[in-house]
Amino acid sequence: MSNNDKVFPLRFFDPRRTARKDSEAVPEQPDGVDHARRKLLKGLGTVGVATASAASSPAWGGATLKDTWGDFFQDHYQRMSPDEIQAALGRIERRAKQRYGVDIQCENTPPQPGVVFGYAINISRCQGYRDCVSACVEENNHGRDPESTQYIRVLEMDQGSRSLERSEHYYDPETVPVEGKYYLPVQCQQCDDPPCVKACPVQATWMEPDGIVVVDYNWCIGCRYCMTACPYWARHFNWKEPDIPAEDMNPNTHYLGNRPRPKGVVEKCHFCIQRTRKGQQPACMEACPTGARVFGNLMDPNSEIRYILANKTVFRLKEELGTEPKFWYFTD
Amino acid sequence: MTLFNFLRDGVREMLRGGWLYRIWLGVLLIVIVIGVGFYVNQLRFGLVTTGMSDQVSWGFYIANFAFLVGVAASAVLLVVPAYVFHRKDIKDVVLLGEGMAVAAVVTAMLFVIVDMGRPDRLWHMIPLLGRFNFPISLLAWDVVVLTGYLLLNLCIPLLMLFTRYRGGEPNLNLYFPFILLAIVWAISIHTVTAFLFSANSARPFWHTALLGPRFIASAFVSGPALFILALQLIRRTANYPVSPKVIDTLAIIMTIALQISLFFVIAELFTDFYNEGEHAASVHYLYLGLEGFQALRPWIWSALALNITAVIILMIHPLRRNRVTLSLACVLAFVGIWIEKGMGLVVPGFIPTPLGEIFEYTPTANEILIAIGCWSVGILIFTLLAKAGISIETGRLRQAAEQ
């Protein structure tokens, strides 16, 4: 079977093809959040991977010999001097220009002192719109074809059960939410004892001082052992170099975050490091129309997330595995 | 009679041979070149050329890797009787066993390299120059034990052959500590490879203490099976005396190992299916299918049938002693274990995913041709090592060098 025959038997959620039906009125909820939004998710059918059409890069990918040399011998992120990091950022920007024709800004904003990020999701508010998914794809420069990486999976769950085995990943009804279902968004749980970090044979992934588990895309060897170690299916591999249309490229990037990734390396949700280290909300939280998502500093006793941990009944996914996620779920 | 002369004569001997031998080398080379061609394709477009996905992120390559580490480890079954129990007949073939271990380890490593997304960054694993996550990462452990095993199995036989090439007899007392180390090391390579999988609490299918013992038991089937077949081939083609007692011993070891291996399978099936919970979803997928997805079902039942047929043949003394039926049992068990410990072990670990998604995997032609290329590299290495080794052992090379 040639690769062109490869067919994904399941449908993939494509944010670009998601149409929104705002006209239909839905009773206003007591908390005042506008719920009059429904999603029309078009059936996507099966999608083949067109390897043959993938752009073949010229020798050195169009880069200068100096950049190629610099890329090859680039040291581990944590061992680079400030000058070496600046040189690396320059190479990333030039590469994005060559590959995608876009001027991007690749930064290296450091973690803020006294900050450890955490996330909490109110699953009684989540309606399964998947606006977080589309916002994440756009913010984090993911490929736009349907089989491209998405950091967030919103699972459609049966009321009365929390079985992931019985969850629906590709729910595609006329409108959401569906009667008898609730929705559970899953992304990297930013474990405090991350099994993926233990698994990596070259320390290409680690936990930053602000609690974010990051990947040095220039150090990862692509063995994918971290993907087998992750209990939340939060790690994704670049099976090919992502295709991002120039007009869709988000030019504000971070070395450890949303910069365009090379093929053959693993990536994951990084709590929108390019935004959150500058005090902005992660894209998924900003996009959520129901206010189900709460992101904040766990070290700040006055933060909303600390209020939730202190006053709501929360749970964490697969807590029994001892991974200590910094990601909580709660209900009203 | 320097080391240089020894290596030069050894390489010369590897390339010398009748027309059948040369055709054999030629065929292997062609298959390797084809594999390299498809590997270039994979490097160019990325691993999208394989059937793997974020859901099933390891496939045919890692399946063959796990299997081959077992074949490599089973060389210990010759080393122990040869050097610890001083069985003269086994001592005559032990170098061939070590040659097979070298070939199997190299091929196993090759399978890991072709599976890597960024083989150009292999140097990141070199301590100090790169950043080697030892002793935390089990993959780092695997690199250490496989490299060490390769060195042990290259150096010990090489030095022994060198002594023999110079007309001497190796002083076994000198080698004994290293041979003991190699014995422990052989068990360690397969244990670490099993731990590589069983370390993942995210994957209930692998997360069982039985995985290590299962790996060892099945390795002691597949290794002797392959070795018995290779010995019969060598005896016919290379004019090299192989005592029938060697094959008898290996056949008995294989019989017992296969019985234990099947017992372990039963133990796992019982634990998973009696009071079946979500941890059993992968086993359910493997043997019975899950929600209509059942790509591996025919494979695993074939493996079970092959292994059971093989064990029945092996348990009937006249059939085990008959070379034809023994060879048949070896082929059946080899294929059976290859399925069980290859695709049957690696792929179900990913199905369903930790989030409960069922997404199937089928290797692509590109992937299979690269894998065939890797296997050919292994067969080529074994052929060349065996060819030179036999000549040195029998003193033919020395006679030639003296003339």
Image (tube, rainbow, N blue to C red):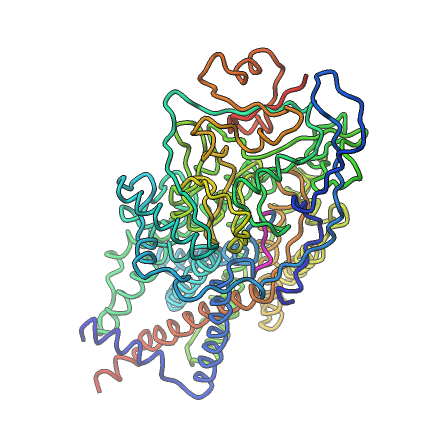
The C terminus of chain A is located in which quarter?
Answer: top right
Examine the rendered structure and indicate whether residue A16 appears above or below residue B7. above
Q: In which quarter of the image is residue A165?
A: top right
Q: Is residue B260 visible?
A: no
Of residues A327 and B90, the one drawn nearer to the viewer in this rendering: A327
Q: Answer left or right for A301 relative to B121.
A: right
Residue extending farthest left: B2
Quick check: can you spot residue B363? Answer: yes
Whether residue B12 is situated above or below residue A246 in the rendered picture: below
Q: On the rendered image, what quadrant is the N terminus of chain A found in?
A: bottom right
* Coordinates of residue B255 in the picture (x, y in percent): 58, 57
Left or right of B334? Residue A262 is left
* Quarter of the view holding residue A15: top right
Point out residue A268 in the picture as x, y percentages from the top left corner.
51, 40
Of residue A90 and residue B50, the one placed in the foreground of this image is: A90
Where are the magenta residues, as a range? B50-54
Magenta span: predominant SS is: loop
| Percent x, y of residue B336 | 62, 59
Q: Does the magenta stretch include residue A218?
A: no
In the foreground, B182 or A266: A266
Q: What residue lies at 64% left-to-right and 65% top-to-bottom?
A: A4
Total labels: the figure holds 0
Image position of A326 with respect to B212: above or below: above
> What residue sits 37% from the left and 54% below the top?
B121
Residue drawn at (44%, 61%), measured in percent from left and top?
B110
